[in-house]
Image (tube, rainbow, N blue to C red):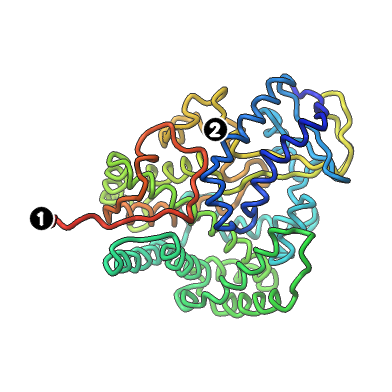
């Protein structure tokens, strides 16, 4: 049963802000800031955040934690039951279009589903679900997507051969070409100006309402996206949504590109673990070699590795909701406009709930342990759950398996070779080296 929110003292509020919220904001909620993600890894900021929130949860007996930041009142969930209520209660009485989210995402995707109002949401949600084929683990156009993955994997293999290894920047270039092809078709794979514009506007989005809009950049992004949507083949994501609603299609696509960035970060982290653990690498390669599922085969182990990587190192730092009307919570009335925060790193690796909190256990995604826990939300949950979950996992799992087949070794792999795993891993700092040739010393 829900408990009334506990009002934090000034000292407790300062500790939560300084240890939990500030590091998340500093790293960049919309696009990561490389120097600060490296700092977060050195300081293992997620471990400190978990310690603070766990202590306050125990002190207040599992009550949500209420604090005030200027005019803004926030409530931090501390139990899976609270998370479930927030997610199942979306979009009413809790909207996914929180104040901070609207301020951030309006810089580059003002018409997207995630920050839409109730009327637009009823229209846009089914449109997105159909284009992304949300109901199926393998997208209707999965064969075309996997063909794009194969081309990206071949490009990455050539880069490894030429450079003797791979860093995050080289991976990112190939990843974005893959994303552009999956989204718009092969003709668009080299138009990385779209990515540059998106990232510039996402950097503005890190500041939410505090950064002035740059409408000239957004206009160029929208123009390029609209041109790609207009000529996208029907076997691409953009072609599918265009065929359903050509007017709304260009406004939805920027969010898909944004979401694919997080999938790239997760693929890199999963590859790092596989490169440090021969048993994980072997299972990924073996699953890919079993082609009984056809070219767009479901790769259950690969998917589970990605889900486990995003559990261990969440790409969405916090799930946000705002109360749209006064709501009873544990006998107390929560005013309309109150912001609710689910800190992913706290819930995903809570040792009081999860025996495997700091371990790499893909099997938890097969036996129900992870899916049954409402605190583990790699793709959110409830009516606002990410409709692109399956298409992202399809693309990323096929690339992960092909990259595992290269036999790369990850630098500083000793930190990933065994449990417990680090609380914070900077994906932008990951570097891989090619294995030595047989017989060469």
| Drawn side of residue 39 relative to residue 168, left or right | right
Q: Residue at x 70, y 61 (%)?
A: 205
> Disc 2 marks which residue?
349
**Image quarter in which the N terminus is found:** top right
166 lies above or below 92: below
Image quadrant of residue 60? top right
In this image, 371 relative to 17: left or right? left
Query: Which secondary structure, mark 2?
Result: loop
Which residue is identified by label 1? Answer: 439
Determine which of the numbered discs, if any, sits on residue 329 in the image.
none
**Residue 216 in the image: above or below residue 104:** below
Which is more N-terminal, label 1 or label 2? 2
Label 2 to label 1: alpha-carbon separation? 43 Å
Quarter holding residue 376: top right
Determine the secondary structure under disc 1.
loop
| Residue in the picture at 48% in, 43% down | 307
Q: Between residues 144 and 211, which one lies in front from this camera angle?
A: 211
Residue 204, position in %: x, y?
70, 64
Position in image of residue 198 (x %, y %): 62, 69
In front of the other: 9 or 101: 9
Percent from the top left, x then y, of residue 334?
Answer: 86, 34
Instruction: Provide residue 380's location: percent of width, then percent of height.
Output: 62, 43
Relative height, residue 392 to residue 46 (above, below): below
């Amino acid at each position: 049963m829900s408990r009334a929110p506990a009002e934090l003292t000034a000292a407790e509020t300062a500790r939560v802000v300084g240890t939990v919220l500030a590091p998340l904001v500093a790293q960049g909620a919309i696009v990561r800031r490389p120097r600060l993600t490296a700092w977060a890894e050195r300081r293992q900021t997620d471990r400190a955040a978990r310690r603070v929130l766990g202590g306050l949860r125990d002190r207040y007996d599992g009550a949500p934690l209420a604090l005030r930041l200027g005019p803004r009142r926030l409530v931090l969930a501390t139990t899976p039951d609270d998370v479930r209520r927030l997610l199942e209660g979306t979009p009413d009485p809790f909207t996914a279009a929180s104040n901070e989210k609207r301020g951030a995402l309006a810089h580059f995707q003002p018409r997207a589903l995630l920050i839409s109002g109730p009327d637009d949401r009823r229209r846009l949600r089914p449109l997105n679900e159909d284009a992304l084929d949300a109901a199926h683990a393998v997208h209707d156009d999965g064969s075309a997507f996997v063909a794009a993955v194969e081309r990206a994997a071949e490009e990455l293999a050539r880069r490894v051969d030429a450079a003797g290894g791979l860093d995050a920047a080289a991976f990112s270039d190939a990843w974005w070409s893959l994303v552009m092809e999956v989204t718009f078709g092969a003709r668009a794979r080299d138009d990385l100006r779209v990515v540059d514009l998106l990232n510039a506007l996402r950097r503005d989005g890190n500041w939410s309402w505090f950064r002035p809009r740059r409408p000239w950049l957004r206009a160029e992004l929208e123009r390029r996206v609209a041109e790609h949507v207009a000529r996208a083949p029907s076997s691409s994501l953009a072609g599918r949504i265009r065929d359903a609603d050509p007017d709304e299609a260009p406004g939805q696509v920027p969010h898909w590109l944004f979401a694919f960035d997080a999938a790239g970060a997760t693929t890199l982290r999963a590859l790092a673990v596989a490169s440090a653990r021969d048993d994980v690498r072997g299972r990924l390669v073996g699953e890919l070699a079993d082609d009984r599922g056809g070219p767009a085969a479901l790769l259950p182990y690969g998917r589970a590795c990605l889900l486990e990587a995003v559990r261990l190192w969440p790409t969405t730092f916090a799930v946000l909701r705002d109360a749209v009307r006064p709501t009873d919570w544990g006998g107390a009335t929560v005013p309309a406009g109150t912001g609710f925060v689910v800190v992913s790193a706290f819930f995903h690796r809570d040792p009081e709930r999860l025996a495997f909190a700091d371990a790499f256990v893909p099997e938890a995604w097969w036996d129900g342990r992870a899916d049954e826990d409402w605190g583990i939300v790699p793709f959110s949950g409830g009516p606002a759950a990410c409709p692109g979950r399956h298409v992202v996992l399809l693309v990323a799992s096929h690339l992960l398996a092909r990259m595992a087949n290269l036999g790369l070794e990850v630098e500083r792999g000793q930190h990933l070779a065994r449990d417990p795993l680090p609380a914070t891993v900077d994906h932008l700092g990951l570097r891989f080296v090619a294995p030595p040739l047989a017989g060469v010393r």
